Amino acid sequence: MKIGGSQIGLKNIDCSYDITYQKFVINNANAFDVLKKLKEDTKASIYMIGDTLHIHPPYVEKGGDVVYDFSVNIESSDLKYRKKDDRKFEVQVDGVGLDGKKKKIVVGTTGGEKRTVKVTSPMSDADLKKRGESELEYLTYDGYEGSVMGWLIPFVAPTYSAKIIDSDYEYKTGTYYVTAVTTTFDENGGVRKVEIGKKVSN
């Protein structure tokens, strides 16, 4: 698929996601818009390393390991801790089938907290369900959600496993999949905002 690679320095694509689009309509959109739409529709892990664009199923790839400790190398955070047993979800996927007709696929706990995922490009029922299950997996776990702000060291990138240590509340310590990293610089130096997704281990 050609998505204006020159806009983002793209030369290669490494894609292991098997969700198939029957038709994908692009209207007055740049490469970033297209990638954002793909990520929203499929929950795929999409990122650039060098000149290679990576598109993979969520939480599958394993990059490296990093440790963040509230008493050592976390400058600030917006983390919130939640319990899986306290929250039940019913995820509804509003999509378009391969025949062009509107489809509604529901997964999760009936009567649970409702979330709606909108998929605007044609997909099979199986792929729409896969999208809903991916959202459900993202929502239901004991642990943190949000991001931490750290310094340039240690290095971290999407697909890394980040262990977050809280010595005051040991039950909150866990390892999470890194979904995005934003590095910024100012007169005080460089910082990394590390966004976490699914908890992968205690």
Image (cartoon, rainbow, N blue to C red):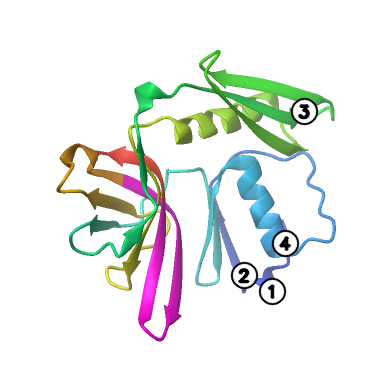
Give, as a three-letter code, the residue at label 1.
Answer: Ser
Q: Determine the CA span between mark 3 and mark 4.
A: 23 Å
Magenta: main secondary structure: strand
Mark 2, residues whose alpha carbon is within 10 Å: few (<14), some, or many (≥20)?
some
Q: Is residue 4 left or right of residue 179?
A: right
Q: Determine the CA span between mark 2 and mark 1.
A: 6 Å
**Residue where numbered disc 2 is placed:** 10
SS under mark 2: loop
Q: Determine the CA span between mark 3 and mark 1.
A: 32 Å
**Residue where numbered disc 4 is placed:** 3
**Residue where numbered disc 3 is placed:** 97
Q: Earlier in the sequence, mark 3 or mark 2?
A: 2
Give, as a three-letter code, the residue at label 4.
Answer: Ile
Give, as a three-letter code, the residue at label 2.
Answer: Leu
Q: Earlier in the sequence, mark 4 or mark 2?
A: 4
Q: Is residue 167 left or right of residue 79?
A: left
Q: Nearer the viewer, residue 39 or 189?
A: 189
**Residue where numbered disc 1 is placed:** 6
Contact flag, marks 2 and 1 (Cβ < 8 Å): yes
Give, as a three-letter code, the residue at label 3.
Answer: Gly
Q: Determine the CA span between mark 4 and mark 2.
A: 9 Å
Picture coordinates of residue 12, whole percent (x, y): 59, 65
